[in-house]
Amino acid sequence: TGDAASTGGGKSKRYVLNPDNYHIGVILLSRYETEYRIVCAGLDLSGNTVTEFSESYENAAMKDIEGSVERLLEADPMIGVLCFSIPGIVSDGVIGVSDYECLRNTDFGKVVRKKWNLPYVMENDVNVCASEFSMRCHQKNAVFVYQPQAEYTGCGIVIRGRIYRGFSGAAGEVRYLPAYSEEEQNRLLKENPERLLREQIISLCAVLNPSAVGYRSDVFSQRIDLTDSGLPEEHRPELIRIDDIHDLMKNGLFTLGKTYKLELLRGSREGKHAG
């Protein structure tokens, strides 16, 4: 604590948050072509990593996810909120379509409440990236698009500084765009992934008109160019390739969890979950 700068009235106090008041637990669920990966980390309130580990499985089951969370809580007992990034559609803790078969059509939020009785944030993984990307590039209307090796392209949308999820949490599921069937998308992912991702980005730009688009592909490394896309130059967004999606997702979860926990402490949120 200390005295804040004078504004003409009585002296006010400036407070600094104790970084070890509680910690933020982040759990990143990812699926790759040949494995399922769970990355767990505990961070203090300054964003410093206290503990981190990853585990890989050929076929991940619910017990594997629960076991990873248990090991995280044992490694960092200061954790006061759990934050999950989910590769799938999330609505109030209920998982719909997901790259993790064990989570499909499950009330995973109920599992978290029953087993650990901690506040939690549960958000689609690409939404997490979009939120962090929007803050990093200082753009309130932004899109983040991720093309993984194993499954369909996902998109996170930020409008006026807030994640847009749609009424059922399915906003950004670009696999449902009518240009290509799922069979055609699977073929293009192998034969011409750059074309597939580029056309999906153009479609999103035409509908949403974002000021910035971040993108990441696990399949190709070339930069995407929208010069001959048909989009007028004045309506083309800033296009930014993201190299480290793990860092983006980890820090995005940390920010969402810290914000949510502070809102709970201030009494402006009811309940036990967000996302």
Image: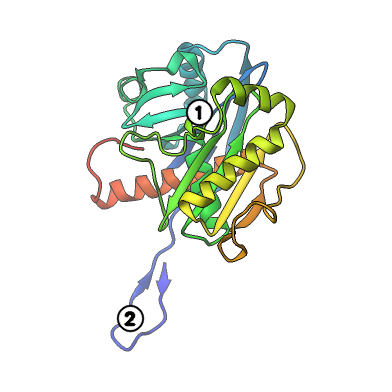
Q: Establish if 275 lies above or below 141.
A: above
Residue at position x 36%, y 35% from top?
Answer: 169
In this rendering, the answer to whether 72 lies above or below 251 is above
Q: Secondary structure at mark 1?
A: loop
Residue type, label 2: Lys
* Residue 99 picture location, percent across and down: 52, 21
Which is nearer the eye, 194 or 4? 194
Mark pair 2, 1: CA separation: 49 Å
Amino acid type shown at disc 1: Pro
Q: Say which residue appears at 39% left-offset and 50% top-offset.
A: 259
Please determine whether, in this image, residue 76 is positioned above or below residue 128: above
Q: Position of residue 164 (x, y in %)?
A: 39, 46
x, y percent for residue 243 = 70, 44
Q: Residue at x 56, y 40 (%)?
A: 250
Q: Residues within 10 Å of mark 1 (few under 14, many from 20)?
A: many
> In front: mark 2 or mark 1?
1
Residue that extends furthest to the right in the rendered view of this protein = 222
73 vs 191, nearest the viewer: 191
Marker disc for residue 11: 2
Q: Which residue is mark 1?
A: 87
All told, the count of numbered labels is 2
Locate residue 264 relative to residue 164 in the image: left or right: left
Q: Give the quadrant of the N terminus.
A: bottom left
Quadrant position of the C terminus in the picture: top left
Q: Residue at x 41, y 38 (%)?
A: 171
